[in-house]
Image (spheres, helix red, strand yellow):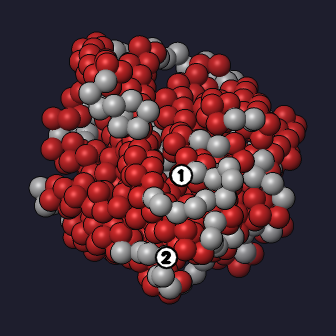
Amino acid sequence: MSGEHAAPAPRGVLLPIGALLLGMLLAALDQTIVATALPTIVSDLGGMDHLSWVVTAYLLAVTAATPLWGKLGDQYGRKRLFQAAIVIFLVGSVLCGAAQDMPQLIGYRAVQGLGGGGLITLSMAIVGDLVPPRERGRYQGLFGAVFGATSVLGPLLGGFFTQHLDWRWVFYVNLPVGAVAMAVIALALHIPVRSERHRIDYLGTFLIASAATCVVLVTSLGGTTWPWDSVQVYGLSVLALILLCCFVPVERRAAEPVLPPGLFAVRNFTLCAAISFVVGFAMFGAMTYLPTFLQVVHGITPTMSGVHMLPMVLGLLFSSTLSGQLITRTGHWKVFPVLGTAVTTVGLLLLHRMTPDSSQWEMGGYFAVFGLGLGLVLQVLVLVAQNAVGYADLGVATSGITFFRSVGAAVGVAVFGALFASRLGGELSAALRGRALPAGISPDTLRRDPQSIGRLSPGARRGVLDAYSASITDVFLSSAPLAALAFALTWLLRQQRLRRSVQVPDESETLGACPVERSSADEVTRALSRLSTIEGRHGLYVQIARGAGLDLAPAAVWMLLRVHYDGPVEPALLEDSGSVPSHVVAEGARELEERGLATRAGLELVATPRGEQAARALADARQQELAELLGDWWTPDRPTDLTELVRELTAESGRSQPPRPG
């Protein structure tokens, strides 16, 4: 942890924090806003076979770019890199909006993804430059809230723009938001430029990204564009295997590996990685193709298809929040991944039951069950992985779990698309066999442009709707065995006692389809700062006094630490600042004077020798409390950055806002 600059006052960070939130909003929204626009995009540009790649290209680019943005920002300055990420993202947005065919749109989505990875990674990292460690958890919680909000707003906004403006506005809407973020960052964000050298694992990043791309190409094009026994499928499969075989020795030799192979020797981490892959597979595959089912099969408008998706999103947010609170309160976690994967499997089977005649209430119930299952398991996987590894691997364990969810999402969307496309052609041909069709309409036309269904006779239209319905819902049935496998894997997880410093992750680590890239020190800082907030200021100072063996009120403890760390203070100025209640300042100062721990020097309050001795005891008690929270990470050979973090948090406990009585 670096203490080489003083954190700005809270008011001074609000404007740049707001700009960072806008940047995060752009990247997070683009993961969900496109889904409800996809049926219209396909009708306009053609290429239902390639629908999945509009989502997959973005996911793959974000996943590949995320590790690089964080380390390049450390080396060359996060402000400069964040501005570059905004520019790349906005250029990609303009190009996507101007795309004239599906290959162009797919390529431009990859450009967007390259910028999106930087927006997500750097926005959360810059928070660490702006606010002190003790306050970091509160501000980073705002970024988690952005992910939660975009999960709800994305489908609604995508449908609204598509229906009332044009699908291209799904991408153009990024321009004014991005321009505001860029202007505020340029004018209001002032952070020190530190050069922290990294041995960036370019080769490892290239190998794992290339292997993932090969897998996605095989799963999306195999059986549709290429036969399963084609040279292309065999060649890409072999290439993916070779790349993975090269990846392992490269990572063993890398100074800062993207994914250390030693992590897979940890049983719970390996199981969480596999389960995360399945959860990403099911979650993003379903979220991509459910709007197509609603709009094509049920004729629901793009805007209303976003409304119909709300039961799934709200169910996910509800169960995710509830499970997080229960785990924090009880410390027991294993029941949630077991129950979550079971409910997710049931949800996929229920989604398979949907037909053109299903009522809105029936479909809403199915969506809610599926979302509840996902929410029960999402947060727990990151938590269990963090709890299973040593301090040195904490950061890469977090990014590793979200990495596997990201790859699972990309593969899931591709597999859903391939199964849907391969099934749809046969279903349409069977449904229209022997029927007279309007001029210019054929099974191939209906497959490329779903909006042409409106030109069919009622009998033919019903057959086509049944074909679309069966093709999409059979994909959910095909995915259910994979979810059942994840359910079986959850039983193999070992129940381990949670470290108190391992906190339930926020939505930025559980809802996003991108790897969260933080160092081990960043993860511990976030967790301890959140824990201090959870425990409450009043109880914190009571505990410090008890640990130091002092009978002091919380207000007096705060005041004495303030004098100890900042030197003589003038109580009247603290009262006039408006940030501290006057009676708290007065009570703390009065008790210190009465106990002989402080004395007046003019208007200033100065610690006496006895007071300095008591303050050192309080600081030691606070440091010991933090050490106990860290559990078995606080070993004799603990890293220097962990020791510095505890010292910095200890000092800040005396400078932060005082407790409110009671």
Position of 186 relative to 387 (above/below): above
Q: Which residue is mark 1?
A: 443
Q: Quadrant of residue 519?
A: top left
**Amino acid type indicated by mark 1:** Pro
- Where residue 102 appears, as percent x and y from the top left, is 64, 36
* Secondary structure of residue under mark 2: loop
Q: Say which mark, if any, is on residue 278.
A: none
Mark 2 burial class by Cα count in 10 Å: few <14, some 14-19, many 20+: some
Q: Which residue is mark 2?
A: 356
- Where residue 565 appears, as percent x and y from the top left, is 59, 47
Mark 1 burial class by Cα count in 10 Å: few <14, some 14-19, many 20+: many
| Left or right, residue 631 beside residue 108 | left
Q: Quadrant of residue 389?
A: top left
**Amino acid type indicated by mark 2:** Pro
- Where residue 544 appears, as percent x and y from the top left, is 42, 63
Q: Nearer the viewer, residue 648 or 26?
A: 26
| Left or right, residue 153 beside residue 371 | right
| Left or right, residue 93 beside residue 273 | right
- Where residue 267 appears, as percent x and y from the top left, is 15, 44
